[in-house]
Amino acid sequence: MVRALRKSEGFLYVLPALAFVGFFVLWPLAQLIYLSLTDTSLLGGGKFIGFENYIKAFEDKSFWRALWFTLKYTVFITPILMGLGFALALLTAPNRPLQQITRGIVFLPVVIGIGSSSLLWFWLFDQQVGLFNKFLVDIGLLAEPAVWFTKADMALVAVTISITWKVIGFGMLLFVAGIQSINGEIGEAALIDGGNYWQRVWYIILPLSLRIILLTTLISVIGSMLAFDQFYIMTGGNPRGQTFTSVYWIYQNSFISFKLGYGAALSIILTLIILVFSSIQVFLSNRSPST
Amino acid sequence: MTAIAEGTVRPVAAEHVSRAAGESRPIRYLVGAVCVAVSTVMLAPIVLGFLASIKPAADARQSPPTYLPHALSLENYFKVFEFQAGLWTYLSNSLLVAALTIVICLALAVPAGYGLARFKIPFKEVWFIILLAPLMIPYQALLTPLYLTFSKAGLANSHLGLAMVHTILQLPFSIYMMRNAFESIPRELEEAAKVDGSSSWQTLRSIFLPLAVPGIVTVGLFAFIASWNEFLSALIFMNKETSFTVPIMLVSVRAGRLGSVDWGALQAGVIIAILPCVLIYLLLQKYYVAGFLNGAVK
């Protein structure tokens, strides 16, 4: 094998990238697995302790709470992102100027950072100076400006609103591409069949978009399961640690409490959970080697 | 804004949708009104943030707030310019990291894409899967071991170190894009070069690279935006005040002095942070949308 590769000119071109992945992804992964079996902290340690960190993780209520909260966030936001994204795609799929401009505007927040958007919304939600609060009062939805970040459920809603604004264009644009390719191929037949717009959406567009909807859902679920920035910035894990996400809790253990070994064990658990979703994603997309 | 359609446009499609929808005039107006409403909602946060940033600092922290500024002032921007180590330090940190990320991504992805697209390689798909590994393993999990290694190697608080981490994020997409870009170039061109006796490296440089420019622009564009916006690893790796990138600077701007948030300065900072991304998106939308649709689900 080595000899065949040495003779292969193409392999030389791929080698630097492979070396990079080996050095910066696979080697750290091996280190992570080892770290998770030790009591390493930023302050020292490093004794091999077997599966103690994992046992601790299973008994760690705060970790389960963070995982549970992450799941709750994911289950809450995903249908909103997919449903609203698909609705916006139906609205903006026709290539008329107004629809095209709308599509461009809806997609705009996708390119800005989650850090920036979270700070923008942190301000909009502020009880004293937040204009979103003021707006809700002005249109009569609230009697007085709300305090959004002192209750976990309110904080979850606030973060969800801000992230929906930030990423809704992502799903929308993928769905638009899907809808347009369907209309190009099937449109004629559907027209002859007759049927109104909503029947077409329900019987033709939606079923034919299933693959892209599933893929977008997976991408979105993985993103939500790895949420950190928005909670770090908007809630700081509060109130009373109720809005820590998994990644945030790992960050907290590793870099605030310096428990690197324990943080590594938590990272492995999270990686295994994500791996389930990301394998399906890679399998479903054309990136898989069979195509 | 029209380019966002060009990436996906099929002129027939538009007619079908409108005719199939059997759109009467009232429905068209309704659709138009919904579009305007959606656009307004989506633009409002940025526009309000911008308007707050040009209020005098005292007005920006006034409660209850006003939608429109009563007076204009660049006070908030001056404050951000002079924040801690100075805005320029943070901008140049972010720019340098982004530039390094672009360079490393291209230096790795262009040859890899060329190799994968144009050569018979034993176990090619195995190598390809390994190159896609960063898609399966969340980089968030790798930050601890990377942090330990980087600290030992003197790469903590270094632009190069952070750029390496950002490259991990972007590499699978970049390789995938470059592989597609090189695969779409006709074989005949390559044959001609072979007849001329050029080496594969010369062929890459003289024939393939110029034709792959759109792919290269897309890869660079995504690398820039990802690096410019990335938060978690910058937070962990750049922990000295002078090595902060712009997103980390923003969090310190909010922390402010004496515990009270300087809202005007914060909005000025946010506007400065999003401006490069918005400009690039508006100018290079064609590349952005093409890359987005190719990379995300295909």
Image (tube, coloured by chain):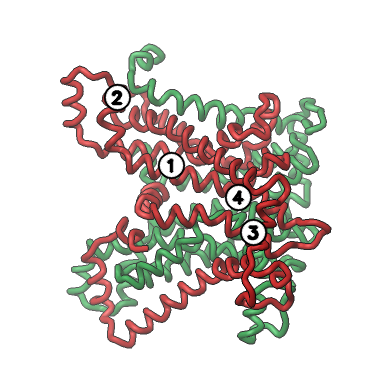
- Residue closest to the eye, A259 or B206: B206
Please, what is the three-letter code of the amino acid marked with disc 4?
A: Leu
Please, what is the three-letter code of the amino acid marked with disc 2?
A: Lys
Q: Considering the image in quadrants, where does the N terminus of chain B appear? A: bottom left
Q: Note whether A86 is above or below A110 in the view shown.
A: below
Query: Which numbered circle lies on residue B77?
Result: 3
Q: Are marks 3 and 4 in contact (CB under 8 Å)?
A: no
Q: Chain of mark 3?
A: B
Q: Are marks 1 and 2 in contact (CB under 8 Å)?
A: no
Query: Which numbered circle lies on residue B120?
Result: 2
The residue at the far top in this view is A3
Assign a secondary structure to mark 4: loop
Please, what is the three-letter code of the amino acid marked with disc 3?
A: Tyr
CA neighbours of label 3 inside 10 A, class few (<14), some (14 to 19), many (20+): many
Q: Chain of mark 2?
A: B
**Labels 3, 1: front one:** 3
Query: Which numbered circle lies on residue B220?
Result: 1
Q: Which chain is red?
A: B
* Residue A127 visible in rendering: no
Q: Chain of mark 4?
A: A
Query: How far is disc 2 from disc 4 in space, using C-alphas?
Result: 37 Å
Q: Which residue shows up at 33% across the image and 67% down it? A: A205
**Labels 2, 3: front one:** 3
- Residue closest to the eye, B89 or B32: B89
- Image position of B287 (left or right of A168): left
Query: How far is disc 3 from disc 4 in space, using C-alphas?
Result: 33 Å
Query: Which numbered circle lies on residue A226?
Result: 4
